[in-house]
Amino acid sequence: MTTTATNMQNTDQKSIYPSLINAMTSRRSDEALNDFQRDFNNRVMGLFADGRSTSVEQFKTDTDNFLRALKTEFIRGESGSKRYVTLKRLMKILTESPQSINELLPHSTVTVFVKITNFNLTIDITLIGHINPMVTIFTRFIAEELAKTVIHAEETYIKLLPYSENNTEISSYSLQDFVAAHYVPQMVEEPERADYYSAYAVGIIFFLLDARRRENIYLKDLLSSTLLMHLESCINAENNCLEMPEIDVFTVGQFRATLYEFRCLDTDRNGVLSPAEMTFFRDGYFNAMFLQRIFDISMIYDRCLDFKAFVDLMAAIKFRHTRASAKYHFEALDFKNDGVLDEDEIRTAASFQAQVVPEYAPNEDSVHIDIVTAELKDMLRLKKTGLTLEEFIDNRMSSTFTGFLSNYSDFMKYERREQ
């Protein structure tokens, strides 16, 4: 980046990246923390202390049947190593389960599972998979995870308060200040631009909390999402040369890769990406119609994407199984902007993909639009009236659908799935 361009960019970004605030925050003593943890564990253990009339053998049968039903409804995480079940599907399974299972997994516990898992109204099946006839094992696991999550939330809440405007919400700018003041100094190898890293991390947090168009988020949503716990895990892994966590998006390495990709696309070095520059995104594997729609649904500056909008796109691709990503892709594919995804829009997107597939797979047979459209309709179980946003989010095939219509790599992977 030239000196002139850098100076212009720094000038323009003063309003985007505010100066850092160094605030003194209070912290509880270890003794108080231990008391809290002990009391909390006792409360959680009490949830499961009541005796059950169900025999151990019957309970084992009930749990086996429940877990079997659970495994038929899972969706895989981005890495493929973790399996998730949506809250809606889990609650449906619970309504069809015997009383013993409903006693073990009351709604309040299920809600906490959602918070422990992440941010997308899904639950990591491995959490539920710890159900055991020896209920104390399961209880101990829950108690430890609940205690860890709640204690971290309370500690972080105290630190966040000086940055909160009203003790209930925090703005994106204030959260950037918080990240820069509390997390960046912990890094052994700090990013070359702390303000860029803070904007990057906060951009991902706001995106995953479905708040990319909002100025503020609720502190309770931020803390219950455990995203700041994931940020700390990334810092700890990089500082101590440990194995990277599955959600590694907050590592300095991932930040640098994203910033490097942005700068490579920014050929005129003006700090934003034009539609022409985005043509080369991911080696051109994302089709032009989808990329144009990204400009249509994003907050742009002089018809260009800034770094924040680029981070939104990267998060939508990386976390395609999340509610936020499903909403992002739905908006991009809703060409009529009427809140409904219909057959005409699916056919239009599929037609555009089919026109350019020969450039990337010249040996492939020609793609029949009618057949592809019919397959995609079946994939979504499309009604004659189309699919609303909520219906699209609830559909377990939405991530496959969006990959199929947004980039040629996923398109060909799906087409060759039976080869």
Image (spheres, rainbow, N blue to C red):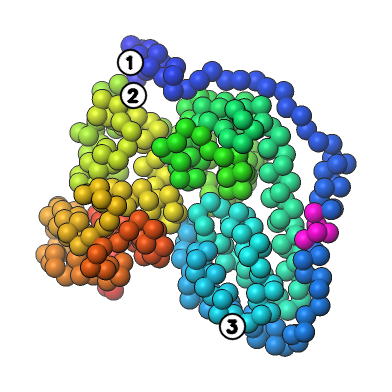
Q: Which image quadrant for residue 63?
A: bottom right
Say the numbered circle drawn on residue 271.
2
Question: Residue drawn at (29%, 65%), measured in percent from left and top?
Answer: 414
Question: Residue drawn at (68%, 38%), measured in percent from left and top?
Answer: 156
Q: The residue under label 2 is which amino acid type?
A: Gly
Please identify the quadrant where the N terminus is shown: top left
Structural distance between the alpha carbons of marks 1 and 3: 63 Å
- Report the magenta residues as a range: 40-44
Apparent side of residue 14 relative to residue 412 in the rendered image (left or right): right
Magenta stretch contains residue 224: no
Is disc 1 placed on a helix, strand or loop?
helix
Is disc 2 placed on a helix, strand or loop?
loop
Crowd tier of the residue under label 3, counting other residues whose Cα lies within 10 Å: few below 14, some 14–19, many 20 or above: few
Question: Which residue is identified by label 1?
Answer: 5
Q: Is residue 353 above or below residue 212?
A: below
Q: Position of residue 220 (x, y in %)?
A: 61, 43
